Amino acid sequence: MNNPHQHLSALQDIRSMMEKSSRFISLSGLSGIAAGVCALIGAWVSYDYVYGYKDYMMGSYSYERGGNSSLAYDAGMDFSIQLLLNTTLFWIAAATFIAAFISAFVFTWIKSRREGVPIWGKTAQRLMIHVSVPLIAGGLYILKLLHFGTFGLVAPGCLIFYGLALLNGSKFTLSEIKYLGYGQLALGIINLQFTGYGLYFWAAGFGILHILYGGIMWYKYDRNTKTSEA
Amino acid sequence: MKNPIENLNKIFDSRIRLGIMSALMVNDEVSFNELKELLHITDGNLASHLKNLEENNCLKVQKSFVGRKTNTTYSATKVGEKAFKLHLDALEKMIRSIE
């Protein structure tokens, strides 16, 4: 009982149990990298559409509007969900989101399996709820921005609401994610001054910051678990 | 000579009971099944440790129904929280004295 190693391991037990039971710690760094890569690809594909090198409307809509126009500087057009569903950009955005979500999920799922933490336990649910609330509110707000044709505010809106969502969720997972949240918020707010460059800020926030964060997290946490297993 | 381990609480000798209390310290309440998943132990084993902690007034039990199934949740008592904190302090002291 007087063995120091025993007491140290008791303290480690306590710490790990407190973390495991209150935070979802299986969030993998690789998930961040994967989501970031998806975002960069999405931004790259949509570049020509956003800055008017290719028309962003599909099929007959494109024809009716008589070809080229730049989304970044267009304002005040009549916007409806129907119209939104007929833009190439909407589908690029949707595909980017789905690809990012699935690839991020896969790496976190693998990690949670390895650690024996249930992927849909109480901690994961709490994290999802706290991240979803600002995201859903932000999503509705951005739909309204599209409705009024204020496209320049869409990218800052995404960044700001996503930053707030991460800050809100940081209490329920690895707390370092709050720095990612602050980063997104800062980019979003700076972007308000440079509204024509939304796509660049968007790519920096969702692409580069994600990859940076994911890389650091992977280096800090995941790398060690692999070497200790081997 | 002062006994170096006098402040270590016997109740928390067991890793399982230590784990249960750790989880209860950071959550308002934890259900039986969540504890089972966290600790990777059998129902019977967990139940006996929970019983032990309850008898020592470290935790209280709340039983409720979700549909027809019973849902048992546990939360730490004031006594339990205090005992656990003292135990942590004692552990810390021991480790410092060794360094």
Image: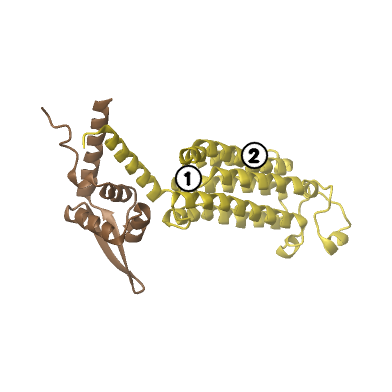
Chain colours: A yellow, B brown
Q: Which mark is residue B27?
A: none
Q: Quadrant of residue A84?
A: bottom right
Horizontal and vertical percent for residue A171? 44, 46
What residue is pinned by disc 2? A208
Residue extending furthest front?
A230
Mark 2 and mark 1: Cα distance apart in space: 20 Å
How dense is the environment of label 1, judged by Cα within 10 Å: few (below 14), some, or many (20 and up)?
many
Name the mark nearer the viewer: 2 or 1.
2
The vertical placement of A56 against B9, above or below, is below
Secondary structure category for the residue under label 1: helix
Describe residue A179's horizontal placement relative to residue A82 as left or right: left
Quarter assignment of residue A11: top left
- What chain does mark 2 sit on? A
B85 or A119, which is in the foreground?
A119
Give the amino acid at mark 1: Ser
The reply to whether residue A141 is in sight is: yes
Q: Are marks 2 and 1 on the same chain?
A: yes
Q: Of helix, strand and loop, which one carries label 2?
A: helix
Q: Position of residue A174 (x, y in %)?
A: 47, 43
Q: Residue type at mark 2?
A: Ile
In the rendered image, the quadrant that contains the C terminus of chain B is top left
Residue where numbered disc 1 is placed: A170
- Farthest bottom residue? B68
